Image: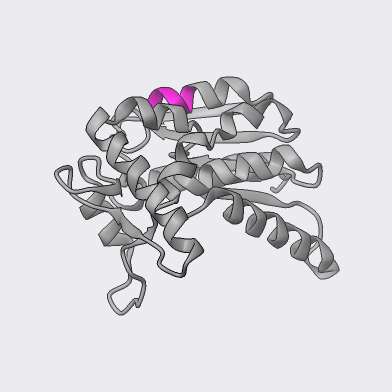
Amino acid sequence: MLPSRQVADWSAAVDRVRAVATLGDGLALWGVSLAGGHVVRVAAERRDVDAVVARTPFSDGRALLRSKSPTYLARAVGAGLRDRVGGLVGRPHRVKVYGRPDEFAALNEPGALDGYAALIPRNSTWQNRTRARTLLALPRYRPVADAADVGCPSLVVAGTEDAVVPYATAERLADALPASSLVALPMGHFDPWEDRFVEVLAHEVAFLDEALGRP
């Protein structure tokens, strides 16, 4: 879950797509949650992205800091440092990616456990854990600081009832993006995958059709 590595993966994917001539023109980046921040950062670093869709985006790590208790923050720093030191001697320390509010996890906001678990395929071998150094990286990850450099149209889709990524951060992101539209819906972080799926997708498709000049 280290943002820097994931952003590098996104940029490499764009390089690959651009190298395939048969795919034609018109390249859009679409990201959700943490990846919603990644697509903003990648678009800010490049000039070959034609549109960006950021759904319920994680765009400001400082907001994450403000939402956590001092006890949680102290434990997060301890776990992160333990991982960094342990990693040097082949003993990495891992924590849960998501959990209940009374559990220690990277994301333990209300609804995080059920919401993320519902997205994992039943037969998946993925494990609910990540390197604890992620807890040190996320608060410093602020795609909103790069938003002004994005040179293409962008759409931000956010939930006013989002308990994982505060709605106010999505508003600030939309304000910082030079050519953006904001769709605010009365929903939580995971509703776009459930009750609001068709509605949210319709907004995104309509935006991409216009941004990419599709009929």
Q: Is residue 168 magenta?
A: yes
Please determine whether, in this image, residue 19 is positioned above or below residue 49: below
Q: Main secondary structure of the magenta part?
A: helix
The image shows residue 127, relative to residue 15, as above or below, that is: below
| 186 part of magenta stretch | no
Q: Residue at x 30, y 36 (%)?
A: 74
110 to the left or right of 77: left
Which region of the structure is painted magenta? 166-171
- The residue sitting at 35% across, 52% down in the picture is 193
Colour scheme used in the picture?
Answer: one colour
Residue 10 visible within the image: yes
Q: Is residue 38 left or right of residue 121?
A: right
User: Is residue 151 shown above or below 84?
Assistant: above
* Near-viewer residue (91 or 14): 91
Tell whether 155 sits left or right of 90. right
Nearest the eye: 2 or 173: 2
At which x and y percent is residue 47? 81, 42
Q: Is residue 138 left or right of residue 104?
A: right
Q: Residue lying farthest left?
A: 102
Residue 38 locus on image (x, y percent): 58, 45
Q: Position of residue 49 (x, y in %)?
A: 75, 46
Name which residue lies at 72% across and 45% down: 212
Based on the displayed image, in which of its 4 quarters is residue 53 positioned? Answer: top right
Frontmost residue, 167 versus 132:
132
Which residue is drawn at the image coordinates 66% and 31% (left, top)? 146
